[in-house]
């Protein structure tokens, strides 16, 4: 299995219910930052040509706290 690599330009979204409350694109190193009010969010990542290996995650954000959330995306098989 190949070593994981960053996915530049992936979209990371934080949702409350079905509403997207924050979104960011990953940089060349796969990093992103979302600024969120305290509360509970569902956080997911997606990118064109990739599929998520993990389900979206439910996260609780507290005031003044920083969370590091990593995602695994896999290339989609090519259909000829």
Image (cartoon, helix red, strand yellow):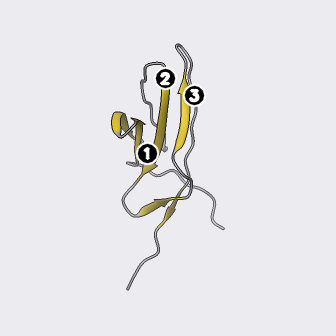
Q: Marks 2 and 1, how far apart in space?
A: 29 Å
- Crowding near pointer 1: few (<14 within 10 Å), some, many (20+)? few
Reading the image, the residue beneath label 1 is 28
Asked whether the beta carbons under mark 3 and mark 2 sit within 8 Å of each other, the answer is no
Q: Residue at x 40, y 40 (%)?
A: 13
Q: CA distance from mark 1 to mark 3?
A: 20 Å
Task: Answer above or below: position of 20 versus 8.
Answer: above
Residue beneath the point at 43% across and 45% down:
28
Q: Secondary structure at mark 3?
A: loop
Q: Tell me the quarter of the image containing the N terminus.
A: bottom right
Nearest-to-viewer mark from 3 and 2:
2
Residue 72 position in % (x across, y down):
56, 53
Callout 1: SS: loop
Give the mark nearest the N terminus, 2 or 1.
1
Label at residue 39: 2
* Quadrant location of the C terminus in the rendered image: bottom left
Q: Which residue is mark 3?
A: 67
The percent coordinates of residue 41 (x first, y second) are 47, 32
14 on left or right of 66 = left
Task: Name which quarter of the figure residue 58 lies in.
Answer: top right
Q: Position of residue 18 (x, y in %)?
A: 35, 40
From the viewer's perspective, is the residue at label 2 or at label 1 nearer? 2
SS class, disc 2 = strand
Give the image quarter of residue 62. Answer: top right
Quick one: label 3 or label 2, which is nearer the N terminus?
2
């Amino acid at each position: 299995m190949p070593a994981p690599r960053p996915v530049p330009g992936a979209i990371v979204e934080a949702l409350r219910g079905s509403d997207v409350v924050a979104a960011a694109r990953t940089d060349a190193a796969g990093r992103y930052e979302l600024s969120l009010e305290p509360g509970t969010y569902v956080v997911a990542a997606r990118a064109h040509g990739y599929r998520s290996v993990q389900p979206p995650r439910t996260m609780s954000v507290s005031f003044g706290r920083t969370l590091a959330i990593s995602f695994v995306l896999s290339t989609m098989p090519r259909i000829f």
